[in-house]
Image (cartoon, rainbow, N blue to C red):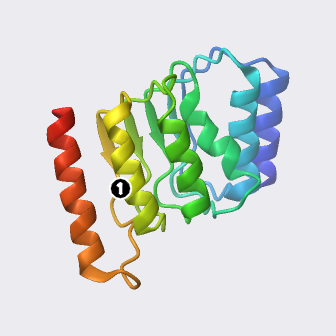
Amino acid sequence: GTGGIAIGKGILEGNQTHILSFKISWNRLKNVGAGAIAKAFVDLGGSAISVVDFSHNNIIDDEIHVLSIANLILQPKMEHYNCSNNRLGPIYAKLLRENMSISKCEAKEVDVGFNPLGTFETAHIIENMKNNKIRKLKLENTCDVYKGGDEDIQYVFELSERVARAKNV
């Protein structure tokens, strides 16, 4: 939490536009810390950041901090975006999906697996793959296993196969 706030403040105040890769996984940043760092990169504008890894940071779904975290995918040089293994849910997934559908989304690899995104949002993220530059998408264990059951998981699997064939990946 507070360490992430200090890092975000340093990035912004130091005008750190030259950072290419920012990997800070396994640090228990939580929403406040990860949100502050993400907001710093977003507020800088013209950042050179191309790799972000916020995996394993105990980030949960909220309406305040996840906006900046989802907006990181829109950085002009973003190639690899990783927010896997947190507790991000449908709020985050909807924001991420909307950002992934914007033409200025340059990301090539997105890893948001092992988050409870929900079957509905997982399916919509897969459908958006038709319209973006992403070539590798990791969505392991993001469906509502206990609500929809095997039928929903099968639907998401078949959808991903159709989209992959259509996109030729």
Residue 120 image-quadrant placement: bottom left
Label 1 sits on residue: 139
Residue 99's spot in the image, x, y percent? 55, 38
- Quarter of the figure that contains the N terminus: bottom right
Foreground: 122 or 52?
A: 122
Foreground: 87 or 71?
A: 71
Q: Is residue 26 visible?
A: no
In the figure, 39 relative to 103: above or below?
below
In the figure, 92 relative to 8: above or below?
below
Residue 149's spot in the image, x, y percent? 30, 82
Foreground: 81 or 117?
A: 117
Q: How many marks?
A: 1
Q: Residue at x 71, y 56 (%)?
A: 31
Drawn side of residue 165 relative to residue 8, left or right: left
Q: Is residue 86 visible?
A: yes
Drawn side of residue 65 relative to residue 27, left or right: right
Drawn side of residue 156 relative to residue 144, left or right: left
Numbered disc 1: secondary structure: loop
Residue 16's spot in the image, x, y percent? 72, 19
Q: Residue at x 33, y 60 (%)?
A: 140
Q: Residue at x 64, y 44 (%)?
A: 69
In the figure, 3 relative to 72: above or below?
below
Drawn side of residue 111 relative to residue 18, left or right: left
Give the residue type at disc 1.
Leu
In the figure, 116 relative to 123: above or below?
below
